[in-house]
Image (spheres, rainbow, N blue to C red):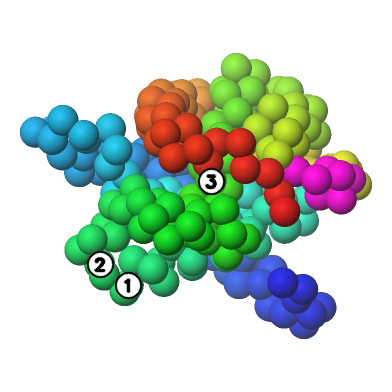
């Protein structure tokens, strides 16, 4: 979907206001959401590995939006994609909140209808949201290892191993051009810092989030493989 210059300007203004209101809270909030997601998994269900609580998952994705927002215009297209994919899952969840409180039920529904691979499917939206989380995990891993690493290098390396294999040449070329707009690492790290944080506590929180994201994403990728969605590429 193409947005007008005015619409893009409005989006950027809203994101700027959100940055000011929620400065530095994204990492902590994501830790809380992922911890909640783990608690919500049915422990007495042998099929618990096929349970992805919809709302907590989408909350984490929205927090990723806020992190990507701090990288700036480079991530604009990815941010738009995440936002639209979140809305797609939210819309189906509203149809039957009880049934679709588990994302896997959405995958089963679309598979039975033969719609899972369609461009507008929730299954495809779930795949790309997962890959966006893969990108975020890879980026945080690099920064947690070395807060002084150049942002451009960290973003490019993370993109190459998580999103590039599934993007067409147009998306890859657009990303390469936009890569020149990433902020320096000090600017980005300072944007992530909460008011009561220093670099050491931020690094610890990054490592905590990574430790939660890793197993969570492994389970999701297993689900995607089970439903034969793991190899989907951009249309």
- Element at label 3: helix
Identify the magenta region: 167-173
Q: Position of residue 226 (x, y in %)?
A: 42, 34
Q: Is residue 169 left or right of residue 70?
A: right
- Give whichever of 22, 49 is nearer the camera: 49
Earlier along the polypeptide chain: callout 3 or callout 1? 1
For the view shown, which residue lies furthest in the left direction? 44
Q: Position of residue 194 (x, y in %)?
A: 48, 44
Report the disc number at residue 127: 3
Q: Quadrant of residue 233?
A: top right
Residue at which label 1 appears: 94
Residue in the picture at 87% in, 50% down: 170
- Element at label 2: loop
Residue in the picture at 77% in, 73% down: 2
Q: Position of residue 104 (x, y in %)?
A: 34, 48
Report the disc number at residue 97: 2
Residue in the picture at 34% in, 66% down: 93
Q: Where's the N terminus, which quadrant?
A: bottom right
Mark 3–mark 1 contact, CB under 8 Å? Answer: no
Magenta includes 228? no
């Amino acid at each position: 979907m193409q947005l007008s210059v005015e619409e893009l300007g409005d989006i950027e203004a809203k994101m700027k206001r959100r940055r000011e209101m929620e400065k530095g809270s994204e990492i902590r909030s994501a830790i809380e959401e992922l911890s909640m997601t783990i608690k919500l998994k049915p422990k007495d269900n042998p099929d618990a590995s096929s349970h992805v609580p919809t709302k907590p998952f989408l909350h984490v994705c929205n927090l990723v939006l806020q992190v990507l927002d701090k990288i700036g215009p480079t991530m604009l297209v990815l941010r738009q994609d995440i936002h639209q994919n979140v809305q797609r899952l939210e819309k189906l969840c509203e149809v039957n909140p009880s049934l679709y409180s588990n994302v896997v039920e959405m995958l089963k529904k679309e598979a039975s209808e033969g719609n899972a691979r369609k461009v507008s499917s929730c299954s495809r939206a779930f795949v790309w949201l997962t890959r966006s989380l893969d990108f975020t995990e890879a980026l945080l891993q690099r920064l947690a290892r070395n807060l002084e690493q150049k942002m451009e290098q960290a973003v490019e390396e993370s993109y190459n191993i998580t999103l590039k294999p599934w993007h067409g040449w147009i998306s890859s070329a657009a990303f390469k051009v936009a890569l020149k707009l990433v902020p320096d690492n000090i600017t980005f790290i300072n944007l992530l810092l909460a008011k009561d944080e220093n670099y050491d506590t931020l690094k610890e929180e990054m490592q905590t989030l990574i430790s939660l994201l890793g197993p969570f994403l492994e389970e999701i990728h297993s689900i995607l493989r089970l439903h034969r969605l793991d190899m989907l590429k951009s249309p």
